[in-house]
Image: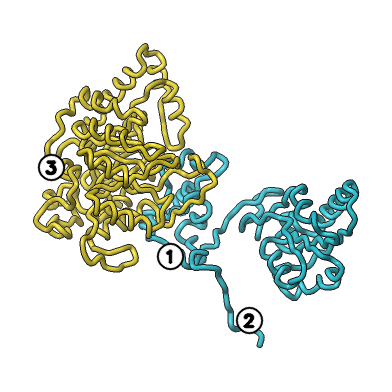
Amino acid sequence: MIVAEPKPIAEVAGLIKAAKHVLVVGCGECVTVCQAGGEKEVEILASALRILWKIEGKDGTIGTQTIVRQCEPEYVAELAKKLKNADCVLSLGCGVGVQFIAEAYLDKWVVPGLNTKFAGGTVKAGIWEERCGFCGDCVLHLTGGICPIIRCSKSILNGPCGGSQEGHCEVNKEISCAWQLIYDRLKGLGKLDLLDVIQPAKNWQTSRDGGPRKFVKEEAMIE
Amino acid sequence: MSAAIAAEPKVAGAAAGVAGARSAAEGAGTPESKYKTGSRLERVLRDGHFAVTCEIGPPQSAKSEKIREHAGVLKDVSDGQNLTDNQTAIVRLCSLAAAVHVKAAGGEPIMQMTARDRNRIAIQADILGAASLGIHNLVCLGGDHQTFGNHPGARNVHDIDSIQMIQMVRAMRDERKFQCGDEIKTDEPRMFVGAAENPFGDPFEFRVRRLAKKVTAGAEFIQTQCIFDLKRFEEFMKMVRDAGLDEKVYILAGLTPAKSDKALKYMQTVPGMKVPDELIKRMAGAEDKKAEGVKITVEMIQAVREIKGVAGVHVMAIAWESIVPEIVEKAGLLPRPRVG
C-alpha cells in the first residue's frame, strides 16, 4: 500500500487560511489502512480545524466526505455535490488522490493534508515500513525476496558496502542492512551462489529516469 | 567460487599455470608490454616491489597550495597518492583537479571516484578528462552516505555501484567501449584500476567473496579500510589466499596513524571500522601520543608485510599528511623503487 502520514495541523491550517468553505476529503484505500486519511481521520481533523477557526473568530464552513478511492475518476465524481458550495478541497488522500481531485475540479483550490511517504506494509500495529522502490524491473528473484533498490541506502546491486556492521546500515542503527538480510536469507536457502554473480548496471529507464510512467492494458480499455 | 574468477593474474609474466588467466599479450593497447597503462604504481606492483601509497585530502576551498605542498613531500616516499572524492560526503576541491595538482608537483596521482555523486555519464566523462590530463590510476568507490557529510539533504545518485564502475572502466580501457556499448574510436582512457575492500565490514564471511567479485569485474589493486584489528585482518587474508585472490590482485593494507586515544575512540564509532580496546589503552598510556601513533603504524606495517598476499601498504594519514615520510622511513621502506 501507499503509506502516508498527516501533515502537522498548524501547517494544514496555514494551507487553508485563505479559504472560506473547505471540504475535507478522505480515501477508503491505503491511507485508511495506515490510519492517515480514512473516514476517522477526516472527521477528527475537520473537528480540530473547526475549533481552531472558532478560536480565531473565522467565518466559514468545514465539511467532510470520504470516498472509496481518490485515484479513480468515477469515485472522485461523487464529490461534485458537496463541492458546489466549497472553494477549497483538503485531500487526505495520497499524492495521487490530490492530483486526481485537482484534475477533476479545475475551479477548486486543492491542497494536501498528508505527506505521502512510500510503498510499504504493516510490520506490526502502528508501524509501517518501506518495501518497494517502483524501479519497474523487479529483481527480487535474485535477492531472496529483499529489495536492494529501496532497502539499501545506496541501492547497491552488488552489496553489501563497507559500511555494513553487525546487521546495521551505516546510515543509522535503526536501519537493517538490506544486504545482510539478503545474505542471511540466501544462506538459509542454500542459494549463496546467486551472490557470486555480478549484477550488471541497471537500466533505470523503467524507473522514473525514463520520465513519468504510464501503463496501458489494452484489453481493459473501454471504447 | 575462486575457480570461476576469470580475471588475469596480477603479474602478467606468471600467466602460466593460473586457470582461466589471460596472458598479457592479449591485453588491449599495449600488446608488447606487461604493463597495461602509463601508471608508475602499476610498474612498481607488477615488478614485484612492496608498494607504498598514501592519501591527500583536498581542501574545502579553491586553494591548491597545500595539495602541491603535500605532493612535493609525498612523491619521493610513496608510489602513488590518493586524492579523495568528497570524503565523508563533505564538499571539497574535486579529486580530478586535485590529481592534476599532484601531477604538476611531480607526484603519481590516484584519483578516487565515488558512485554517490555522479551517474555513469558523468563518471565516464571525468575518466576521459582525467586520462587526457595524464592521470593513470583510478579507485572505484561507492562513497560514504551523504547523511555523514555537510549536505545531508542532498540526493544521492548510485546509478551504478562500485563493482559496476570497475567493469565500466575496464571495458573503456580493454574493449574501448563506453558503458552503453558504443565504441571509443580513439584514445581510450587507460586507467590502472583500483577498488576498496573493508575486512571489518559485515557479513565477515562474505567480504572475501565480494572481493572476488571486484577482481572478476577487473580490479587490479585493492586498498583496504584502515586496519587496527590485526587479528581480523590476518583471518581475512587467509580467506583471500584460500580463494586464490592474492594471485590475482594486489592488496595494499590500509593503515591510519592516530594522534591520540581520542582519535582512536572516535574511529571506533565509525561504521565499518574496528578498533581494539587494547590499542586505545596503549595510546592513552603513552606520554607522547603522536610518537606512539607513529610507532603503532610502523609496527603495523611490519606486521602486515609478513602476511602472505599483502603487496603493499596504503597509509591514510587523515589531516596529517606530513607524518608519512617519517612513518615510511621508520618502516624501512625507503628509498622507493625508481620505475618508468
Q: How many marks?
A: 3
Q: Is residue B249 above or below residue B74?
A: below
Tell me which chain the residue with mark 2 is part of.
A
State whether residue B64 appears in this view: yes
Q: Which residue is mark 1?
A: A203
Drawn side of residue B333 relative to residue B166, left or right? left
Q: Which residue is mark 3?
A: B47
Q: Amino acid at mark 3?
A: Asp
Q: Position of residue A67 (x, y in %)?
A: 79, 67
Q: Is residue B220 above or below residue A206?
A: above
| Marks 2 and 3 share the same chain | no
| 3D distance between C-alphas at marks 2 and 3 | 67 Å
Q: Residues within 10 Å of mark 3 (few under 14, many from 20)?
A: some
The answer to whether the residues at label 2 and label 3 have Cβ atoms under 8 Å apart is: no
- Which tint was used for chain A? cyan
- Which tint was used for chain B? yellow
The secondary element bearing badge 3 is classed as: loop
Label number found at residue A150: none
The answer to whether the residues at label 2 and label 1 have Cβ atoms under 8 Å apart is: no
Q: Which residue is mark 2?
A: A220
| 3D distance between C-alphas at marks 1 and 3 | 40 Å
Q: Residue at x 17, y 43 (%)?
A: B40
State whether residue A167 appears in this view: no
**Residue that sits furthest to the top in the current view:** B287
Q: Amino acid at mark 1?
A: Asn
Please name whichever residue, A140 or A22, is drawn nearer the observer in this view of the structure.
A22
Tell me which chain the residue with mark 3 is part of.
B
| Marks 2 and 1 share the same chain | yes
Q: Residues within 10 Å of mark 1 (few under 14, many from 20)?
A: some
| 3D distance between C-alphas at marks 2 and 1 | 28 Å
Q: Residue at x 76, y 64 (%)?
A: A109
